[in-house]
Image (cartoon, rainbow, N blue to C red):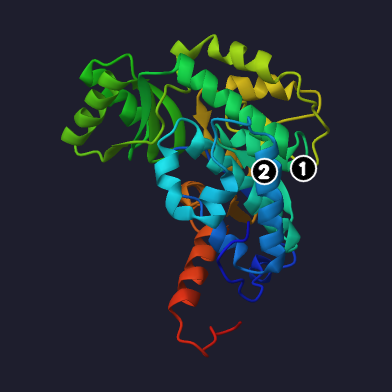
Amino acid sequence: MSSSFSVNRSYSRAAELKPDDACAFLFPGTGSAAAPDLRGLAATGPVARRVVLDVLDAVQEGLPRSGWPSMRAILLDDPSAYRAHAASPGVAQLAAYTASVAVDRSLRAEGVEPARAVGQSFGEIAALVCAGVFTIGDGARMAVSLVGVLAERGAGGGMGLLETGEDATRQIIGRAGLPEVVVACLNAPSATVVSGPSGPLEALLEAAGREGVRAVRLAVPYLSHHPDMAGADDQWYELIRGFPQRPLEIPVHSPVRGRAYSDQDDLHRALADCIVKPVRLPQTLREVHAEGTTVFTEAGAGNALCQCARLTIPGVQVLTPLREARRRSEETATRPVGKSAPGI
């Protein structure tokens, strides 16, 4: 099947970096409903297009033969079909995983090598795949099985984002009398994610709004990072523990464990811990920055984690490849025939 889009002249993110820059690739979780723009990424040049196609093929090999749409169809050939398919459990999560691996591989093909990686929650699967610990296909199998466990054990729950700090969030929970809702993730000093059953969660978000705190429900249709998920971690661990664990090729820093992984860690168990234990991203971002990271790069759709990095470490340099790819794709689509973009 051929894709109906044109490939622009090559554009390299490496040109934006200084020789002594050290990049940390950030692998986001699944709180965004945005469609990953792999068509825009593939259109940045023939190398990127080949990488995107190879990643899509590898992911598809890891999917069950029935019950899942073609990732190539909904992310590359006909992105307009993405939203309809994303209503099915797990599709958005698998698309996010695919996008993260595609961005990582395309950046490396351009000469942008990560000095270290950080995975946020579900993003730890992609971070470990891109560190060489698991294959792309095995990562897809892990993602599919995780969605199944979360749908079974976390049904009836969800997650929400409050634009305030952890202490203030806990105070709102206390004043609202909603102990069923817990702090799940600290994304930035002023961005806290909560998790809980749908009823109490909605009540908490409304309570936050009444106190003047912006609060929104995330596109995560299940409980996660919640004590009620105890047992789901063991269930998923048993499903994934057979996938071969290879040596780390780059350091992977976990906001759940609060440190970099080592080859002595059972990384299947570390992934399973993400189902129940909270995420503390600012501490990890500060640590990798202190270790020499000069550029934080969003290995996935959007710029959520780069925004977290800027809120945590003001003034830090960031790269957002998929957002840049979309911008360049839109410029190309609207440019008059016969005109060239400056600098290309």
Where residue 6 sits, quadrant-wise, is bottom right
Residue 23 visible at all: no
Label 2 is placed on what type of residue? Answer: Ala
Residue at image point 60% right, 24% down? 145
Q: Nearer the viewer, residue 131 or 84?
A: 84
Give neighbour class at mark 1: few <14, some 14-19, many 20+ (Cα, 10 Å): some
Question: In this figure, which residue is indicated by the disc labeled 2?
Answer: 117
Residue 206 visible at all: yes
Q: Nearer the viewer, residue 82 or 27?
A: 82
Label 2, label 1: how far apart the Cα atoms are:
7 Å
Spot occupied by residue 20 in the image (x, y as percentages of width and height): 74, 63
Residue sitting at the far left = 210
Residue sitting at the far top = 231
The local secondary structure at tag 1 comes to loop
Quadrant placement of the C terminus:
bottom right
Residue at image point 60% right, 20% down? 273
Spot occupied by residue 230 in the image (x, y as percentages of width and height): 51, 10
Label 1 is placed on what type of residue? Answer: Ile
Question: In this figure, which residue is indicated by the disc labeled 1?
Answer: 250
Q: Are marks 2 and 1 in contact (CB under 8 Å)?
A: yes
Spot occupied by residue 341 in the image (x, y as percentages of width and height): 53, 83
Residue at image point 52% right, 39% down? 282
Residue sitting at the far front = 1
Spot occupied by residue 38 in the image (x, y as percentages of width and height): 56, 56
